[in-house]
Amino acid sequence: MRETSPVPADKPYQPGIFEGVPPVARFVLFNLSDPKVDAAAIREALTRLTPLVDGSDVVVGIGPSLAKALGADIPNLHEFPDFSRGDIKVPVTPGTLWCWMRGSDLGDLLHVTRKVQKALAPAFTVRHAVDAFRHAYKEGGHGHDLTGFEDGTENPTGEAAEEAAFAHGLGEGVDGSSYVAVQQWVHDLDAFEALGDEERDHHFGRRLSDNEEIDDAPETAHVKRTAQESFDPPAFVLRRSMPWMLSMQAGLMFVAFGKSHQAFEQQMRRMAGHEDGVVDALFSISKPVTGAYFWCPPMREGRLDLRRLGLGVT
């Protein structure tokens, strides 16, 4: 069984966002099968999809272009910006519909993916799928990147997590929703392994041995570049990133949920050096190859609340 944090039944958000990362997952991106697919066909496909989405085993995100195709105005939703700066490349790869399949067995997730695929056809087609997993770098560990460093150490918890990850005060059909940034990062593990122990620690700003923050780490350290409380306003997000691998290529599926995209944008701009010219050391051992934003609708009566897309809950 997957380890989860209990989510009260009266909460309006997709509970998988609040729960910890599962043992295995699939990140599946769908596109419209044809640019000429009309809004009626899209709504029919989404209507077939909703019974398959509990918000826990399957988390769904709507891309800005899909909202636009349905004539929906979702507050604060827009396409992923271009954060590139000089030699630092941060790709923009807009997506239409995003699904995070969560579970404990990849075979089961393949069957879930097929059910979702059939429900969305013929309006949608699979564009990309990435299999991911929870990595325990050492005995008793959990939620580690393939470099061995723990991911999401600074995640807010409890009410602070709800405040950071979910929209509120924006009205029915939006409150309880979440705005997610999704990037696939490819690691250069040879470059990382070539670093000395102290260099590795200074790249991240934490000690690999005990995960303690290093006070005198260089300004390029990832922890210093992204310290959530150091921004104005503070840039808190709820990270649910997971390692991935395909043959001998591997990296991190970076996934960050917020009450808007603002906090992620503050962090990404600083990482790329837009504020002060200082580039996050992470770019020397890893690089993003995708970048997209999605809006994760709230839940209502146990199903996705798609009122803002013109669909009622039946």
Image (cartoon, helix red, strand yellow):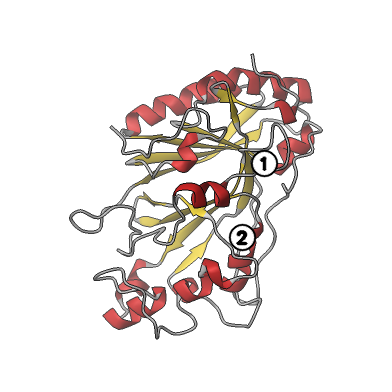
Residue type marked 2: Ala
Q: State the quadrant of the C terminus.
A: top right
Residue type marked 1: Gly
- Residue at screen point 46% across, 32% down: 8
How many residues crowd mark 2 within 10 Å: few (<14), some (14–19), many (20+)?
Answer: many
Q: For residue 308, which quarter of the picture?
A: top right
- Up the image or down, 60 lies above or below 289; here it is above
Spatial CA span between label 2 and label 1? 18 Å
Number of marks in the image? 2
Q: Is tag 2's residue or tag 1's residue first in the polypeptide sequence?
A: 1
Determine whether, in the image, residue 115 is placed left or right of residue 290: left
Marker disc for residue 263: 2
* Residue 22 spot, x, y in % from top left: 36, 41
Q: Which residue is mark 1?
A: 63
User: Does any portion of residue 126 appear in the rendered image?
Assistant: yes
* Residue 79 spot, x, y in % from top left: 71, 51
